[in-house]
Image (tube, grey):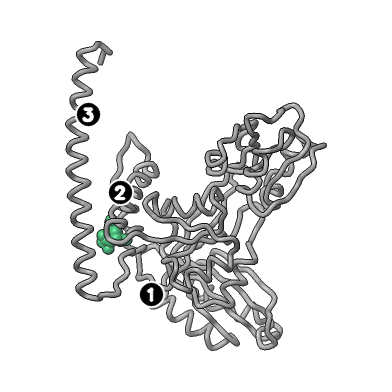
């Protein structure tokens, strides 16, 4: 098709018509969501409106139906926002996250719940747990493992002391940038602020580009971004959200040593999540200190052909629990084969706590 002005007018008219249709359909969808809310409240006045298993199914279906030209993830992100707005009509969801504002955890929270969620920054991981326990937030978002740096022990330890359950997971690709303020002398950078994890993830790049600069660890990337605003010789390593929040310039983009650098976050809450059709389960298990304990623990998973996705050991903090294992596997505890494995593990373990069965991250 040639780009004459009549073609342009015609195409724009078509786009206006399509937008009118999309608008009508989104409104119709929002109306249905409001009716769902009324049905839920009629059945149970304390009903929880947010249904992660249903949301996962909606997104997976959209991705499967999509035939381009937008890619499936992009399309799902649009639907994520539509659902987020529909849910906010039912009941605005309050999400506590490891702050301050501008952290990757906030980015993960918004990726999972959409921009219509109300996100509440907390100063520490255990505060996120406490905020949800106290009912001041409906859900919490905490980091649990990074593909380069491994597990986040604070999060695992918080589960040992808490009754919170895992309601979902979200994986975020982590891109770090070297950021400066408008007033910074870029040729005179002598100090770089960041979170210790981010320094570790950008170690090689820093060694080759800024071997002389002092590396100052701070409590979060967002805090690093805030600090450089007032220092003409300093830079920060942080992500997109912090760069935007503090209006910083990028001296270098995507400086992480590994291009597949990603972090997995958990959604915590006090709901048991029904089957979504593609689920994971997380457990914490204490074994007695005896030879073959780990083998005994893992053997039933192997025999029932259940796919383990993660195994972490933490030192026990009580005398009874000698080893504490955190185990993630594919499957939902309402599936008979998973139930059978859990029963067997229960017999062999000193203590077992199912932290939750939840939909595998879609986006
Ligand atoms: C509409 C519902 O409630 C919420 C909104 C959803 C949506 O917009 O599709 C999906 C699940 C719930 O979080 C529902 O349960 O179906």
Cβ of mark 2 under 8 A from ligand 1: yes
Which residue is identified by label 3?
15
User: Which residue was labeled with disc 1?
Assistant: 335
Q: Residue 296 lies in what quarter of the image?
A: bottom right
Could you say which is closer to the camera, residue 141 or residue 92? 92
**At 36% from the left edge and 63% from the top edge, which residue is drawn?**
52
Residue pictured at 19% horizontal, 57% vertical? 32
Q: Position of residue 297 (x, y in %)?
A: 59, 79
Q: How much space separates mark 3 and mark 1, taking CA atoms?
A: 47 Å
- State the mark number for residue 67: none
Point out the image quarter for the N terminus: top left
Residue 135 placed where, x, y %? 43, 71
Q: How many marks?
A: 3
For the residues labelled 2 and 3, say whether their Cβ atoms are less than 8 Å apart: no
- Asked whether the beta carbons under mark 2 and mark 1 sit within 8 Å of each other, the answer is no
Q: In this figure, which residue is indicated by the disc labeled 2?
A: 82
Above or below, 134 against 251 in this view is: below
Label 3 crowd (10 A; few <14 / some 14-19 / many >=20):
few
Which of the marked residues, 2 or 3, is nearer the chain's N terminus? Answer: 3
Name the spot of residue 37 as percent of width and height, x first: 23, 64
Q: Please, what secondary structure does the residue beneath circle 2 have?
A: helix
Secondary structure under the numbered disc 3 in the rendered image:
helix
* Sequence-earlier tag: 2 or 1: 2
């Amino acid at each position: 098709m040639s780009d004459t002005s009549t073609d342009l007018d015609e195409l724009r008219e078509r786009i206006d018509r399509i937008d009118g249709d999309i608008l009508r359909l989104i409104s119709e969808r929002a109306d249905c969501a409001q009716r769902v809310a009324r049905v839920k409240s009629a059945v149970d006045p304390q009903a929880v409106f947010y249904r992660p298993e249903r949301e996962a199914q909606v997104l997976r279906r959209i991705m499967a139906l999509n035939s381009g030209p937008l890619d499936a993830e992009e399309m799902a992100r649009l639907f994520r926002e539509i659902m987020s707005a529909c849910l906010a009509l039912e009941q605005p969801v309050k999400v506590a996250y490891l702050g301050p504002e501008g952290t990757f955890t906030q980015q993960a929270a918004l990726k999972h719940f959409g921009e219509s969620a109300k996100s509440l920054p907390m100063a520490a991981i255990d505060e996120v747990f406490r905020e949800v326990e106290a009912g001041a937030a409906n859900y919490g978002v905490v980091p649990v493992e990074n593909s380069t740096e491994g597990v986040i022990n604070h999060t695992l330890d918080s589960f040992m002391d808490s009754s919170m359950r895992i309601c979902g997971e979200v994986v975020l690709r982590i891109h770090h940038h070297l950021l400066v303020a408008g007033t910074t002398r870029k040729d005179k950078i002598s100090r770089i602020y960041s979170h210790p994890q981010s320094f570790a993830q950008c170690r090689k790049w820093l060694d080759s580009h800024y071997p002389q600069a002092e590396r100052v660890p701070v409590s979060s990337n967002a805090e690093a971004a805030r600090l450089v605003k007032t220092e003409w010789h300093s830079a920060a390593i942080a992500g997109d959200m912090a760069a935007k929040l503090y209006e910083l310039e990028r001296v270098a983009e995507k400086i992480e040593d590994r291009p597949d650098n990603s972090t997995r976050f958990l959604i915590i809450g006090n709901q048991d999540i029904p089957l979504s059709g593609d689920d994971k389960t997380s457990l914490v298990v204490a074994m007695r200190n005896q030879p073959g304990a780990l083998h005994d623990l893992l053997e039933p998973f192997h025999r029932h052909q259940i796919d383990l996705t993660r195994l972490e050991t933490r030192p026990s903090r009580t005398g009874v629990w000698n080893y504490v294992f955190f185990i993630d596997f594919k499957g939902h505890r309402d599936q008979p084969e998973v139930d059978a494995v859990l029963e067997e593990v229960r017999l062999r373990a000193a203590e077992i706590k199912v932290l939750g069965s939840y939909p595998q991250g879609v986006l």
